[in-house]
Amino acid sequence: MRNYISTISFCLITLFSSAQSPEWFELGATWTYNWNGVVDPDQIDHTYDYSVTEITEHLGQTCSKIEADQGEFGCLVHQAPYYVFESNDTVFFATEEMDSFSIGYILSEGAEWQYEVDIFGYSSVFNVSVTDVYATDIDGIDLPTYTIEYDSESGGFVDLYPSERTVVKYLGDLNMFVIPFGKNGACDFEINEVLRCYSSATLSYQNPDFSSCTLGINDLEQNSSLKVYPNPAKDQINIKLNDNRVSPNPIIQIRDASGRLVLSGSLSYQSVDVSSLKPGLYLVQVFSSGESLGTAKLVVE
């Protein structure tokens, strides 16, 4: 009997000890963020995804490579891919344009550091401090959560909105991807941005304000300011903004009924080739400089 009990105990200990603990930037980890323009009267939602695609070497450091899967938010100072690693509660990041790693976060109570970025020949400097630390239940695990404040020391073309951020260990920033890279002055509009969900081999998070990680056709309301014809269509559609607005460099995006981006590009002409799309229901969006110009439903035969 003792041997039997010992065997059971050993199996239980082995089972629990083999369970993986969450880590920063695990291979395959994916973040999905939701955003819409503050000034957009329709508050149309968009999503963009980032994933850890490989563990690699960059600038002599073993790190995780993070790439944009689709819909990367274009006004960030630093664009993907990102190279990131964590050491002693400090998160470091670099891009392919940087010649060294920089501090993203120092995750300890009372920590202070500077975040500096140069763009258009001007330097923006922020004094950063961790003002509060508490626990948040994520997937049944109490994870350290940090309130981080960014105080602008100098001007420049970089803005952080909001200036107070919430960072959860392993998930990162709940508002803007992983490290608050800020938006540059070329994008003079504010956005509502929030982490929609996160998933890895050891941890998952679903924002309770959203029913799923992907946009559904019902998340994107039809807007009468955009006209798409013929509808239904087979090979080609024509795009017309009913208020005849002229906007610089308009972008078109077409999503299927699950919210997956299936076609995107510059709207150089009023007609768009949709012959590559399978028959079904789609949603067409046109926007410029992050502002939605209109949406319309499309049926492809």
Image (spheres, helix red, strand yellow):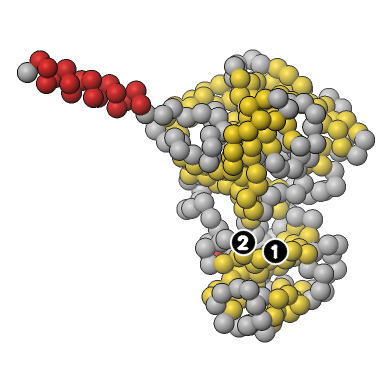
Separation (CA) of disc 2 from disc 1:
7 Å
- Residue 173 image position (x, y, % from top left): 61, 35
- Residue 123 image position (x, y, % from top left): 88, 30
Badges 2 and 1: C-beta atoms under 8 Å apart?
A: yes
Say which of 296 and 96 sits in front.
96
Count neighbours of disc 1 (C-alpha within 10 A) and say few if under 14, some if 14 to 19, many if 20 or more: some
Q: Based on the displayed image, in which of its 4 quarters is residue 93 positioned? A: top right
Q: Based on the displayed image, in which of its 4 quarters is residue 96 positioned? A: top right
Query: Pointer 2: what residue?
Result: 261
Residue 221, visible in the rendered structure:
no
Q: Based on the displayed image, in which of its 4 quarters is residue 222 positioned? A: bottom right
Q: Residue at x 67, y 84 (%)?
A: 230
For the residue marked with disc 2, what is the amino acid?
Leu
Q: Residue at x 64, y 53 (%)?
A: 70
Q: Residue at x 91, y 33 (%)?
A: 122
Marking on residue 264: 1
For the residue marked with disc 1, what is the amino acid?
Ser
Say which of 28 and 246 sits in front.
28
Residue 203, visible in the rendered structure:
yes
